[in-house]
Amino acid sequence: MGHRCRFVQPEIVRLYLAPQEGEADYIDVKKELTAGEQRHIFSGIVKEMNLGEKTTLDPDQVGKTKLVEYIVGWSFLGIDGQPEPVSESAMDCLDPDTYKELIDLVDAHEAKTAEARRQKKALIETT
């Protein structure tokens, strides 16, 4: 019996935002995150965590930590009309509707990837 690779393969997926006035903006995201990237999301949103107590989240980081880990590129232009590099500070400057749309897109992508992984695992277990 062969061995499977247990490391995340670096793949990029393009996700399109809802078209606005003829625009076709997109984001390029990692197909799936590594264990370390998932830990970064968790540790980035936790403000305080004590054994036996309710965890306190940092509201400024909720959502943003996931975007930072997933998004590797986008089609957004800056105020000067030039391509805007992906960065945490650029994400902070997005309009609230775009920011929410990015979170919704990444959440849907993450759910779709998790479901595909579950189905693949179930198929392997039945064979």
Image (cartoon, rainbow, N blue to C red):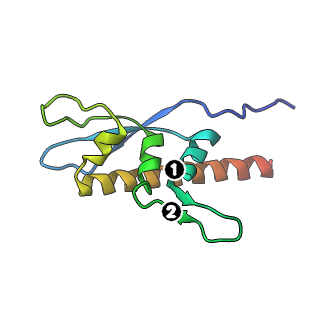
Q: Label 1: few (<14), some or many (≥20) within 10 Å?
A: some
68 sits left or right of 100 in the view: right
Amino acid, disc 2: Leu
Across and down, in percent, residue 101 comes to 32, 54
Q: Are marks 2 and 1 in contact (CB under 8 Å)?
A: no
In the structure shown, which secondary structural element does the residue marked by tag 2 occupy? Answer: strand
How much space separates mark 2 and mark 1, taking CA atoms? 9 Å
Give the numbered dot on residue 57: 2
Of residues 87 and 125, the one drawn nearer to the viewer in this rendering: 87
Of residues 84 and 54, the one drawn nearer to the viewer in this rendering: 54
Which residue occupies 72% across, 53% down? 122
59 sits left or right of 75 in the view: right
In the structure shown, which secondary structural element does the residue marked by tag 1 occupy? Answer: helix
Which residue occupies 60% across, 46% down? 39
Across and down, in percent, residue 71 comes to 41, 39
Across and down, in percent, residue 75 comes to 26, 35
Compare marks 2 and 1 and give the one earlier in the sequence.
1
Which residue occupies 12% across, 31% down? 80
